[in-house]
Image: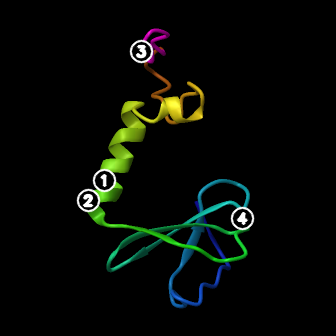
Amino acid sequence: MRLVDHYSADHPALLWYAVGRNPRSLLLAESSDGVLLTVAADRRRRVLLLTPDEWADLCDAVRAGALDGVLGGRALCTDPHRPLDPGAGA
């Protein structure tokens, strides 16, 4: 992740980081309340706040493959050392 210029009226002092290579896509910031997510290209500058427990649950679910079905069966964050189980989503 890399630091990007992003200014939110509701969260002016936070440091925002681009998740991928595109600085206009998903951004993350940390606050005392938890982790904030936004999409840089969103003109409304909407922000989603996840508490530390919610963030941990989300990370665990992504790592476990529990959200793979959201993208039509594509693996979000699979372990490159573990072979994919083609029957896992069925």
Q: Which residues are magenta?
A: 84-90
- Please, what secondary structure does the residue beneath circle 1 have? helix
Quadrant of residue 24 in the image?
bottom right
Mark 4 — residue? Answer: 23
- Please determine whether, in this image, residue 6 is positioned above or below residue 77: below
Q: CA distance from mark 1 to mark 4?
A: 24 Å
View extreme (left): residue: 53
On the image, the x and y values in percent for residue 26 come to 62, 60
The label number, if any, that marks residue 53 in the structure image: 2
- The residue under label 2 is which amino acid type? Asp
- Label 4 Cα neighbours within 10 Å, binned few <14 / some 14-19 / many ≥20: many
Answer with mark 4 or mark 2, whichever residue precedes in sequence. 4
- The residue under label 1 is which amino acid type? Ala
The answer to whether residue 2 is left or right of residue 84 is right
- The residue under label 4 is which amino acid type? Pro
The label number, if any, that marks residue 88 in the structure image: 3
Residue at left offset 68%, top offset 69%: 40
Answer with mark 2 or mark 3, whichever residue precedes in sequence. 2
Answer with mark 1 or mark 4, whichever residue precedes in sequence. 4
The label number, if any, that marks residue 56 in the structure image: 1
Answer with mark 4 or mark 3, whichever residue precedes in sequence. 4
- Please determine whether, in this image, residue 66 is positioned above or below residue 20: above
Residue at left offset 26%, top offset 59%: 53
